[in-house]
Amino acid sequence: MSAPASLRSVLLSPLLRQNPVTLQILGICSALAVTTSMETALTMSGALTVVLVMSAGLISVIRRHIPDSIRLIVQIVIVASLVIVIDQILQAYLFEISQRLSVFVSLITTNCLVLGRTESFSRHNPPLRSMVDALGNGLGYSLALTVIGSIRELFGAGSLLGWQVLPTVDQGGWFTPLNLMLLAPSAFFLLGGLVWAIRSVLPDQAEALEYLSPDDPEASQ
């Protein structure tokens, strides 16, 4: 049996090599919907990371006391309770951003990244290790959303975090905002480009071909 990975590896691996968005293609609904600006992307990232870490810790603590027959129900109840708390905090202190995020904060409850980590990792590992894994996956998710959000806001509005970076034409500048960047399809294409770029640098992440062309020499072997 191989030795368990160190906490450092557990934390850093989801940032690039095991990124939940670009490798496992998890949580992409929010990646497509809330990345029109850096503010919404960072807020969503923070909310999901907090919920992910806290739920991982709680589920790991009680993992030996959860019957298998109701484990998913218990996990969803824990995650949903944390999401309600986070949503109320956002509405109290960041109301405008909360309104812009709309239902997507509430949908963290059913986010496949959160449920996937609690089901596959937190149920089988001690609290510290589970929370480190959750933090790593939350940061990996945040990194993907930040990259996409920064590109969309920069080229869609000429700004970053609300600060004007590229002077737009209506302000007497030279830059014409690309309205397409603020539409959902742009996030889809940017996410696809990000996945392609990472898998070009790290070819081991690319899936094996299911079918080979008849002209491929390997097909005749």
Image (cartoon, grey):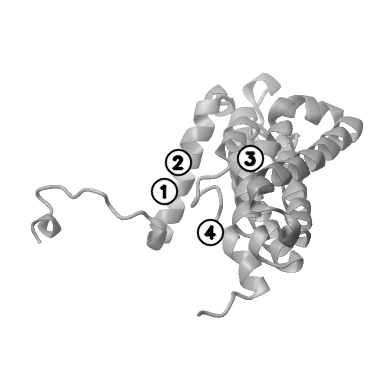
Q: What amino acid is found at the position of numbered circle 4 in the picture?
A: Gln
For this rendering, which residue is in front, 111 or 172? 111
Q: Please identify the quarter of the rendering in which residue 44 is found.
A: top right
The disc at residue 192 is: 2
Q: What amino acid is found at the position of numbered circle 2 in the picture?
A: Gly
- Image-based side of 23 in relation to 150, left or right: left
> Label 1, label 4: how many angstroms apart (C-alpha)?
15 Å
Query: What residue is disc 3 on?
Result: 111
Q: Residues within 10 Å of mark 4 (few under 14, many from 20)?
A: some
> Label 2, label 3: how many angstroms apart (C-alpha)?
20 Å
Q: Residue 69, can we see it?
A: yes
> Label 4, label 3: how many angstroms apart (C-alpha)?
18 Å
Query: What residue is disc 4 on?
Result: 18
Which residue is at 68% across, 46% downward? 70
Residue at the far right in the pictured view: 92
Q: Is mark 1 on a helix, strand or loop?
A: helix
Q: Are marks 4 and 3 in contact (CB under 8 Å)?
A: no
Foreground mark, 4 or 3? 3
Q: Are marks 2 and 3 in contact (CB under 8 Å)?
A: no
Query: What residue is disc 1 on?
Result: 196
Q: What element carries label 2?
A: helix
Foreground mark, 1 or 4? 4
